[in-house]
Image: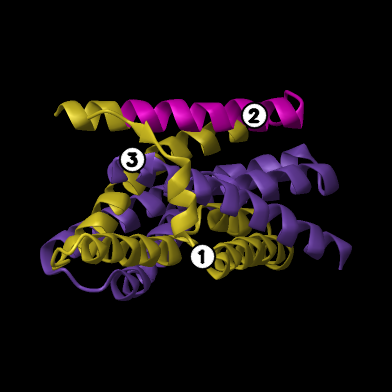
Chain colours: A purple, B yellow
């Protein structure tokens, strides 16, 4: 329970901090960089390395490469769809979550398993 | 294009919008930990780059851009969606930095102190992301 609470506070704080940085900067395309900040990764890897060991955390980082490639595919699709069809951002970003899932698990099946 | 920073932009975000980001960010960190415990680190690691906060951020950007245009007495049209699309383009560039971050942690964590690896890799994320942004701006 203590570990879950610690993850919640640390993860929430880092995500909020990077998101606030994204609010501060202009132009929008530069601010967008902070949308792909390693906030969840920093919180998780720090706690995992401490509790499970560095080797375990480095295996997580290896898989994170697949997740980050999937993030690139996902955000590129979101950008293309928003520019082309002008649909509401919430609809597009949620509708395309399966793109991240399929890409990430496809990479996992092919290279990381 | 010149990069500008304005702290007054923080006032545009409401307290519940900050709270939403905090809760979603915290929840995905907990979720990634639980997935790693249940299915092992190779599956759990994927979720370290899950776009959990992205839908909320894109929606906020869309909303704020519309409000800004309407306050200025202009018709917002599709400006909100265009702003969110630009943010997504930036996130795509940032995700290249995220790949660099993950590779660096993967190789250097077993050899060096955790704090040094995470700080150095976060700096590498920033440098790679900004370099990609500069290259894209010049194309």
Quick check: can you spot residue A34?
no
- Secondary structure category for the residue under label 1: loop
* Label 2 Cα neighbours within 10 Å, binned few <14 / some 14-19 / many ≥20: few
| Front label number (1 vs 2) | 1
User: Is A16 situated above or below B21?
Assistant: above
Check contact, mark 1 vs mark 2: CB within 8 A.
no
Query: Is mark 2 in CB contact (under 8 Å) with mark 3?
Result: no
Q: CA distance from mark 3 to mark 1?
A: 19 Å
Provide the chain ID for the residue under circle 2. Answer: B
- Is residue B119 located in the magenta-colored stretch of the structure? yes
Q: Residues within 10 Å of mark 3 (few under 14, many from 20)?
A: some
When asked about the image quadrant of residue B132, the answer is top left
**Mark 3 belongs to chain:** A
- Kindly report the distance in space between the C-alpha atoms of the residues bearing marks 2 and 3: 25 Å
Label ID, residue A26: 3
Above or below, B14 against A20 in this view is below
Residue A57 % position (x, y):
70, 44
* Residue holding disc 2: B119
The label shown at residue B14 is: 1
The residue drawn where x is 40% and y is 53% is A71
Which one is nearer the viewer's eye here, A27 or B43?
A: A27
Q: Which residues are magenta?
A: B107-132
| Main SS category, magenta section | helix
Looking at the image, is mark 1 or mark 2 earlier in the sequence? Answer: 1
Residue A45 pos. (x, y %) = 69, 45
Q: Quadrant of the N terminus of chain B?
A: top left
Q: Of circles 2 and 3, which is in front? A: 3
Q: CA distance from mark 1 to mark 2?
A: 30 Å
Image coordinates for residue B115, horizontal then vertical, percent: 74, 30
Q: The disc numbered 1 marks a residue on which chain?
A: B
Residue, x 26% and y 64% (percent of image)?
B71
Q: Residue at x 47, y 60 (%)?
A: B13
């Amino acid at each position: 329970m203590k570990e879950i609470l610690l993850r919640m506070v640390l993860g929430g704080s880092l995500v909020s901090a990077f998101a606030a940085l994204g609010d501060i900067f202009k132009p929008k395309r530069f601010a967008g960089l902070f949308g792909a900040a390693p906030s969840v990764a920093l919180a998780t890897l720090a706690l995992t390395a401490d509790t499970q060991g560095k080797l375990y955390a480095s295996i997580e980082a290896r898989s994170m490469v697949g997740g980050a490639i999937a993030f690139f595919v996902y955000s590129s699709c979101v950008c293309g769809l928003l520019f082309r069809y002008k649909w509401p951002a919430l609809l597009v970003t949620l509708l395309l979550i399966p793109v991240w899932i399929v890409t990430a698990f496809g990479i996992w099946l092919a290279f990381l398993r | 294009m010149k990069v500008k920073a304005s702290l007054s932009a923080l006032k545009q975000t409401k307290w519940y919008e900050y709270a939403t980001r905090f809760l979603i960010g915290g929840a995905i960190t907990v979720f990634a930990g639980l997935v790693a415990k249940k299915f092992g680190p190779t599956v759990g690691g994927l979720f370290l780059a899950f776009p959990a906060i992205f839908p909320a951020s894109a929606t906020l950007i869309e909303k704020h851009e519309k409000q800004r245009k309407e306050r200025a007495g202009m018709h917002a049209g599709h400006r909100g969606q265009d702003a969110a699309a630009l943010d997504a383009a930036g996130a795509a560039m940032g995700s290249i930095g995220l790949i660099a971050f993950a590779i660096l942690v993967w190789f250097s964590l077993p050899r060096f102190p955790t704090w040094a690896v995470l700080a150095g890799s976060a700096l590498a994320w920033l440098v790679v992301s900004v370099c990609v942004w500069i290259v894209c701006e010049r194309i």
